[in-house]
Amino acid sequence: MFATLQNPLALVGRILLAVLFIPAGFSKITGFAGTVGYATAMGMPMPTVSVGIGLLIELLGGLALLAGFGTRFAALALAVFTLVASFIFHGYWAVPADQQMVQQLMFFKNIAVTGGLLAFAAFGAGAWSVDAARSAR
C-alpha cells in the first residue's frame, strides 16, 4: 500500500514544508528592517547580511523544495538553516519561565521540521518532481 502512496506523499510533504518557508522568506523581504532589528536584539552576528542570507535560503530553498528541483541540496540547506535558527531564536532554556513553554514548542517544532528536511535530503523528492523529470531524460 505505501509503495503506491510514496510519490503522492512525497509531493504533499514537499508542499507542506514549502508552505513554512516561502511565506517566511517573503515576509522578510516586506519587513526587512523589522526582521533585522529583531535579529540584532537576539544577538545575531552581522544581522543585515544574516537576514538577507536567511531570506534567500527560505525563499529559494522553499521554491526548490516545492518544485522538487535540486531537492536534496535545497532540503539540506533548509535543514541547516532551521537548526541554526532554532538555537538563535528559540533558546527556551534562556528565557523567563513564563516564556519557556512557547519557545520550547517552537524549538522542538523546528527540530521535527529539520528531521523531515533531512529525510528529503536522504531520499529525494519522489517521482512527481522536476528532479525525476530531469533524470528521466
Image (cartoon, helix red, strand yellow):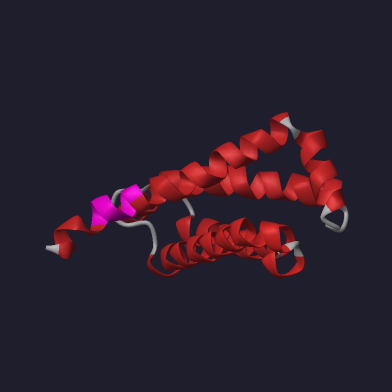
Q: What residue sits 37% from the left and 57% below the top?
A: 125
User: In the displayed structure, does residue 74 sit left or right of residue 135?
Assistant: right
Q: What residue sits 42% from the left and 62% below the top?
A: 120
Residue 47 makes an appearance in the image: yes
Task: Please state, as top left, top right, bottom left or bottom right, where the N terminus lies in the image.
Answer: bottom left
Closer to the camera, 67 or 85?
A: 85
Q: Position of residue 37 (x, y in %)?
A: 84, 42
Residue 137 makes an appearance in the image: no
Q: Magenta part mainly helix, strand or loop?
A: helix
Number of residue marks: 0
| Up/down of 92 relative to 71, above or below | below
Is residue 113 on the magenta stretch? no
Region of the chain picked out in magenta, as a range: 7-12
| Up/down of 15 relative to 87, above or below | above
Q: Position of residue 39 (x, y in %)?
A: 80, 50
User: In the displayed structure, does residue 90 sit left or right of residue 75?
Assistant: right
Is residue 11 on the magenta stretch? yes
Q: Position of residue 54 (x, y in %)?
A: 70, 50
Looking at this view, name the residue that lies furthest to the left.
1
Looking at this view, name the residue that lies furthest to the front.
98
Q: What residue sits 68% from the left and 44% below the top?
A: 55
Q: What residue sits 51% from the left and 46% below the top?
A: 20
Q: Position of residue 112 (x, y in %)?
A: 48, 64
Q: Quadrant of residue 4?
A: bottom left
